[in-house]
Amino acid sequence: MEAPHSRATDAAPARNSRNSRNSRTSAVRSVESPDAMRDLGRSLAALLRPGDLVMLTGELGAGKTTLTRGLGEGLGVRGAVTSPTFVIARVHPSLVGGPALVHVDAYRLGGGLDEMEDLDLDVSLPDSVVVVEWGDGKVEELSDDRLHVVIERAVGGETAVESEDDDRRSVRFTGYGARWAAADWSRLEALTR
């Protein structure tokens, strides 16, 4: 049985000045299941390149690691992508000559860039795709160009376990800086079909 895929919502992309380092673009996708979240990650990987910083935000169990698992598959990296909660960061080298995936879970880190500096992400960033879960307020200074992905339960934030819509998620992609100013979010939609 083929897994259901993400589908675009009716939300139009928002665009600001293309030349400003503070420029911002965004898109929203609906995801119906964990398999669809993984598919979305695989599709997103096709838009990423070395030097990209991706920040993931969402409650526990929202699907951040599932999306990252799909990213790893799409990038063709070595090793199973699992939550790096206890090791803080994992590096997955490419098996196909592409960028490595550096997967960071900043949940247990205090605040600010000081603790993040110990991970040497600034050294890894130019040659890798760096994905940081729980990075809000901690990694923005690493790059003016970054992609912020917010994953929310589609039904009112937190959903009761017995709800049949528990797997549904709304995923908002917001790109900051010149790198994302001309982002073609329709490619993401086409890749998930």
Image (spheres, helix red, strand yellow):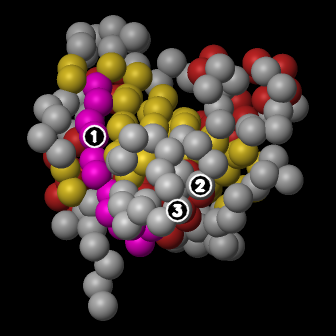
Q: Quadrant of the N terminus?
A: bottom left
**Residue wearing tag 3:** 161
**Residue contact between numbered discs 2 and 3, judged by CB atoms under 8 Å:** no
Name the mark nearer the viewer: 1 or 2: 2
First along the sequence among labels 2 and 3: 2
- Measured in 3D between alpha carbons, the distance from the residue under mark 1 to the one under mark 2, in whole angstroms, is 19 Å
Look at the image and give the residue range highlighted in magenta. Answer: 25-37
Q: Tell me the tag on residue 28.
A: 1
160 left or right, relative to 185: right
Q: Nearer the viewer, residue 132 or 162?
A: 162
**Is residue 31 within the magenta segment?**
yes
Q: Tell me the tag on residue 61.
A: 2
Amino acid, disc 2: Gly
**Residue contact between numbered discs 1 and 3, judged by CB atoms under 8 Å:** no
Amino acid, disc 1: Val
Q: Is residue 144 above or below residue 88?
A: above
First along the sequence among labels 1 and 2: 1
Name the mark nearer the viewer: 1 or 3: 3
Q: Residue at x 37, y 67 (%)?
A: 164
Amino acid, disc 3: Val
Q: Residue at x 59, y 55 (%)?
A: 61
Q: Is residue 76 above or below residue 179?
A: below
Name the mark nearer the viewer: 2 or 3: 3
